[in-house]
């Protein structure tokens, strides 16, 4: 009897040919939780801390709702203790030779290899993500990250001479980001000699497990401290004195809020915001492959976010048909089932998706969902939204997991306009079998990562980051290392906060100026022959000197008492200058490096011709004759130097397991605004202008407030040499102009070298479009020294990286 | 109902023997013959057509033909179509399985085009390889062929079968192939009429797996009858 029973069952299996369950045992995850009596504290200073009277958040299985463990929530004092532990550890850890840190990271990679089952079952159990992705994607990558950064630590003394670790790094992760996002940042930080305090979402045991594994192995306790805590605690960690840099992963609004909170608090802020990705499907694409790319991007549990999909209209019907057919075959289920495409991600993610779908429907969008999932189930069906009017709020908003929002385009140019019209600039893929078209789109997209005919590839060697509202911090590759380094000898970052600074009124009003007498020249008539006449009056905008919009002037008095008037620039002038710069930026960015170099050299030659005039003007502003002459000479050399460095703009990376190269491109930022310091009126101006131009940016500069005439002198040569609008110089009240620039939404980056208050304001205001800012926090800079005046720090700030993946095969 | 293979595939010269042997065993498994100058296909067209006719006369109900690789590599798609049409006619009632020999066709684009032409010319099955090339059934090639089958089905409503051959030796491999078909074409293709695995050495591994399932021990090859 029994035999026939088995026989008929076997036949049923052969007839139905359904997938069977492939459960992954999570006994080891539960056993690990049991060793903590199902109560997880904070891992700080190399030991578990379970302080009393803390809230405990229960960590639940997102599918069954079963309570797996409780996680103690950190409070302010816990954060302070953790930062203290990291500070103590930093003293020893940063002094260890790179080879020792490399050995440690290699050992940690081995430990992860040995305990990977615990790692992947715990992660999948708690987050609900498909175990296949965690096991075959995240865990091997975490291990590769450790190995790659071990090599970097080993090579640090030689390859990164002149740079030193920043100190204590505060890492803040918001819910959709996983332990892997922590590893992307912890590995380079530890490799470079920094120590880390990580604040992870309220119920996330995996980062704690990693901290324990890392801590048990560490020669120095406290290099990696991890605590669970509410998002509210983020600013507390970020403002903790001693934290030198804050790396934040989360939503765009949270990042903006943190940027504002952190203005003037001292710590540098690196933001990685949003989770959305973009996929651009042209009519020459292999549609079936692209559909798999869409699955990888949104419905495979690989990415934390949703997908914006642009489809060329001529293949719209075919593509949608194929996507829908593919969606029908996706399987949702318990993450720990090995044959499941998508798990469940808990109530928050589900609510977010539900809300978006409702909104999209009410705004005229059509919704296609494969599979019938009951509303009380923990699963959310893969969802395709299309037909939204382009101006609908949902067409602009960030698309959440697991939604794909499709919209059509007609030409490649239109696709670029649509893609670049988004406020975010994270990652994108281009699908086209035509190489020329694919490359043109890949170069044209303003995002941090572009994959050609693939989506979601990752590798420790390749820098990953973004631009615009996605934040401009980097992880992976060389760029990821610099996030945790600073030029040697940089003083510790202390708060420069001015509590009384009123953001609403800073620089709002220009103090009125009245005529204070007629313009006067140099007094000694014998010098008259050496001096050039005063530079033309006006603001240098769009290639010519223009009267200021406010039609008023400000007096400038040099040290010998001579009086000059320069134009008083205002908000309208900044607007005009930025507009002119945008006109010039694309053409300049497309110029070959050689063409840019030759113009920089021509400007250097022009400066050389003017050297006596420039030197004498410097003298009249109080420089010693010898120093004045030297300042002019160094300025000339700076221009020449940036001209020669131009060839070094990017290189090819080789990635394991990928046939084909990855290009690391250095692209212009766009329009770069620069507020020059008062000191070194010539040298600082040139030292800032040259790298900005060399990297292909158009610039709007505010010259030295006390001595703007030297900049205006140079503008006379700029007018004849450079395309109109490439360089714009606006004189006037520095605080007022800084305000106008910092609040301008269409400036891509801002460098500020002025007062502490100004720096604070710039940091605060940059939250608007999250433009990268570089401020001096009120500290003077030694512009005459190579390291500070011409170092690679300038180069890093003057361009943004893009990784272009080019897999090959026929 | 017992479990059998879908067909017994032999060289043309052995068709008669195979038909006789199966009849003697009281078994209704169809006999398939590889024809058209298997495995290279480098014989005169007339000979190849005659070979098909003879095999059908001998009682083969399924004919596996090899396409002319030269026609693919030089892009003579119409000539390829005409040739397969003639094979089709020569087969008469018998099923036509067209072997693309994908290991020797060059890029995947050629595989896709050849698949579509084979289906347009009336093949009942398209088959990856003869099993005699150096590169046989690989997953990338299979995906291209399966998608061609799906495209053909979406355009015409005709279901064409798929047969990977060569290098599939373990039960685990066969499961991977089953799930590949399930994912790309769906459950309706998971029948002997539309999906077959061409594998001479797969059987013993399946038997070993069953042995392990039943006894809990891994079998040595000598524990099982030779196949």
Image (cartoon, coloured by chain):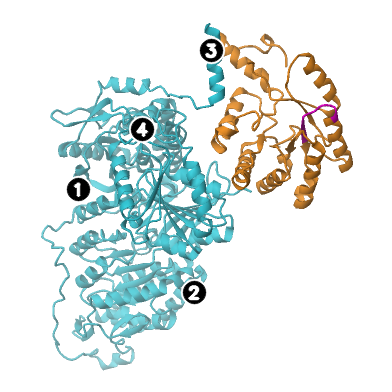
Chain colours: A cyan, B orange
> Tags 3 and 4 in contact by the CB under 8 Å rule?
no
**Dot 4, how many residues are within 10 Å of its Cα: few (below 14), some (14-19), or many (20+)?**
many
Seen from the viewer's position, the closer of residues A252 and A471 is A252
Dot placed on the residue nearer the N-terminal end, 1 or 2: 1
Label 1 and label 3 in one chain: yes
Label 3 and label 4 in one chain: yes
Label 1, label 3: how far apart the Cα atoms are: 67 Å
The answer, for residue A684, to whether it is visible in the render is yes
**Dot 1, how many residues are within 10 Å of its Cα: few (below 14), some (14-19), or many (20+)?**
many
Dot placed on the residue nearer the N-terminal end, 3 or 4: 3
In the displayed structure image, the side of residue A36 where residue A663 appears, left or right: right
Residue A128: mark: 4
Outermost residue, bottom direction? A525
Please tell me which residue is depicted at 13% across the width and 63% down the height of the picture: A502
Residue A50: mark: none
> Residue beneath label 2, please?
A598
Under circle 3, the secondary element is helix
Label 2, label 3: how far apart the Cα atoms are: 83 Å
In front: mark 4 or mark 1? 4
Instruction: Point out the stretch of residues depicted in magenta.
Output: B57-64
Label 4, label 2: how far apart the Cα atoms are: 57 Å
Seen from the viewer's position, the closer of residues A498 and B113 is B113
> Tags 4 and 2 in contact by the CB under 8 Å rule?
no
Under circle 2, the secondary element is helix
Label 1 and label 2 in one chain: yes
């Amino acid at each position: 009897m029994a035999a026939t029973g088995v026989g008929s069952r076997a036949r049923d299996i052969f007839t139905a040919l359904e997938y069977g369950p492939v459960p992954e045992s999570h006994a080891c995850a539960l056993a690990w939780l049991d060793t903590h009596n199902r109560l997880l504290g904070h891992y700080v200073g190399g030991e578990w801390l379970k302080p009393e009277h803390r809230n405990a958040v229960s960590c639940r299985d997102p599918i069954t709702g079963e309570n797996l463990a409780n996680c103690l929530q950190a409070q302010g004092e816990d954060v302070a203790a953790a930062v203290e532990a990291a500070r103590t550890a930093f003293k020893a850890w940063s002094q260890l030779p790179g080879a020792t840190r490399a050995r440690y990271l290699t050992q940690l990679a081995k430990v992860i290899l040995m305990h990977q089952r615990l790692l992947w079952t715990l992660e999948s159990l708690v987050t609900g993500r498909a175990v296949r992705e965690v096991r075959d994607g995240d865990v091997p990558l975490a291990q590769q990250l450790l190995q790659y950064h071990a090599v970097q630590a080993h090579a640090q003394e030689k390859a990164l001479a002149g740079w030193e670790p920043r100190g204590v790094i505060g890492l803040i992760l918001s819910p959709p980001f996983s332990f892997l996002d922590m590893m992307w940042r912890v590995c380079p930080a530890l490799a470079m000699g920094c120590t880390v305090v990580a604040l992870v979402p309220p119920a996330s045991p995996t980062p704690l497990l990693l901290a324990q594994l890392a801590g048990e192995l560490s020669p120095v306790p406290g290099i990696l401290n991890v605590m669970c805590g509410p998002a509210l605690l983020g600013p507390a960690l970020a403002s903790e004195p001693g934290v030198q840099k804050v790396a934040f992963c989360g939503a765009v609004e949270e990042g903006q809020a943190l940027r504002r909170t952190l203005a003037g608090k001292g710590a540098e802020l690196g933001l990685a915001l949003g989770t959305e990705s973009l996929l651009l499907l042209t009519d020459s694409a292999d549609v079936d492959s692209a559909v798999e790319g869409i699955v990888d991007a949104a419905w495979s549990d690989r990415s934390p976010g949703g997908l914006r999909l642009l489809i060329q209209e001529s293949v719209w019907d075919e593509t949608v048909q194929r996507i829908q057919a593919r969606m029908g075959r996706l399987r949702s289920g318990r993450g720990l089932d090995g044959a499941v495409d998508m798990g469940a991600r808990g109530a928050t993610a589900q609510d977010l998706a539900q809300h978006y779908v409702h909104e999209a429907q009410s705004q005229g969008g059509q919704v296609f969902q494969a599979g019938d999932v009951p509303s009380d189930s923990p699963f959310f069906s893969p969802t395709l939204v299309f037909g939204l009017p382009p101006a609908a709020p949902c067409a602009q908003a960030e698309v959440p997991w697991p939604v794909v929002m499709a919209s059509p385009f007609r030409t490649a140019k239109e696709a670029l306009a649509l893609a670049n019209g988004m406020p975010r600039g994270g990652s994108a893929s281009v699908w086209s079998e035509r190489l020329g078209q694919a490359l043109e789109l890949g170069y044209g997209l303003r995002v941090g990562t572009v994959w050609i005919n693939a989506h979601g590839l990752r590798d420790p060697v390749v820098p990953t980051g973004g631009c615009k509202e996605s934040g401009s911090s980097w992880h992976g590759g060389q760029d990821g290392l610099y996030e945790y380094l600073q030029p040697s000898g940089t003083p510790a970052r202390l708060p420069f906060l001015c509590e009384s600074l009123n953001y609403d009124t800073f620089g709002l009003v220009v103090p009125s100026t009245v005529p204070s007498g007629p313009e006067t020249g140099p007094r000694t008539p014998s010098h008259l022959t050496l001096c050039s006449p005063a530079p033309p009056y006006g603001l240098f905008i769009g290639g010519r000197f223009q009267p200021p919009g406010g039609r008023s002037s400000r007096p400038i008095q040099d040290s010998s008492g001579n009086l000059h008037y320069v134009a008083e620039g205002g908000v309208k002038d900044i607007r005009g200058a930025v507009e002119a710069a945008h006109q010039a930026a694309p053409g300049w960015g497309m110029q070959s490096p050689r063409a840019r170099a030759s113009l920089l050299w021509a400007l250097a030659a022009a400066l050389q011709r003017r050297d006596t005039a420039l030197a004498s003007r410097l003298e009249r502003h109080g420089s010693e004759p010898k120093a004045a002459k030297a300042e002019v000479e160094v300025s000339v050399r700076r221009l020449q130097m940036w001209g020669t460095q131009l060839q070094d703009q990017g290189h090819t990376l080789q990635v394991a397991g990928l046939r084909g190269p990855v290009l690391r491109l250095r692209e212009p930022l766009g329009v770069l605004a620069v507020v020059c310091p008062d000191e070194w009126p010539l040298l600082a101006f040139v030292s800032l202008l040259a790298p900005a131009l060399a990297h292909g940016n158009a610039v709007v500069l505010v010259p030295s407030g006390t001595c703007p005439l030297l900049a205006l002198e140079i503008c006379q040569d700029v007018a004849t040499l450079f395309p109109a609008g490439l360089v714009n110089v606006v004189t006037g009240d520095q605080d007022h102009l800084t305000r106008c620039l910092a609040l301008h939404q269409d400036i891509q980056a801002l460098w500020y070298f002025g007062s502490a208050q100004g720096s604070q304001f710039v940091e605060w205001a940059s939250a608007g479009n999250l433009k990268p800012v570089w401020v001096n926090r009120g500290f003077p800079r030694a512009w005459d020294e190579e390291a500070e005046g011409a170092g690679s720090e300038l180069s890093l700030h003057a361009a943004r990286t893009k990784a272009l993946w080019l897999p090959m095969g026929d | 109902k017992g479990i059998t293979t879908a067909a017994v595939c032999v060289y043309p010269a052995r068709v008669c023997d195979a038909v006789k042997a199966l009849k003697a065993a009281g078994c209704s498994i169809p006999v398939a013959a590889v024809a058209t100058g298997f495995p290279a296909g480098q014989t005169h067209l007339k000979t190849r057509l005659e070979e098909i006719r003879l095999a059908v006369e001998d009682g083969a109900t399924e004919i596996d033909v090899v396409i002319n690789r030269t026609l693919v590599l030089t892009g003579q798609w119409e000539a390829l179509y005409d040739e397969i049409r003639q094979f089709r006619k020569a087969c008469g009632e018998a099923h036509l399985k067209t072997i693309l020999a994908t290991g020797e066709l060059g890029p995947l684009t050629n595989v896709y085009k050849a698949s579509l032409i084979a289906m347009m010319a009336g093949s009942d099955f398209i088959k990856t390889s003869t099993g005699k090339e150096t590169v046989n059934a690989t997953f990338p090639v299979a995906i291209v062929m399966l998608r061609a089958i799906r495209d053909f089905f979406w355009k015409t409503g005709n279901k064409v079968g798929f047969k990977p051959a060569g290098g599939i030796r373990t039960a685990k491999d066969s499961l991977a192939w089953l799930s590949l078909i399930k994912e790309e074409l769906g459950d309706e293709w998971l029948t002997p009429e539309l999906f077959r695995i061409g594998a001479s050495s797969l059987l013993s591994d399946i038997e070993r797996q069953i042995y392990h399932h039943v006894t809990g021990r891994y079998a040595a090859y000598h524990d099982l009858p030779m196949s």
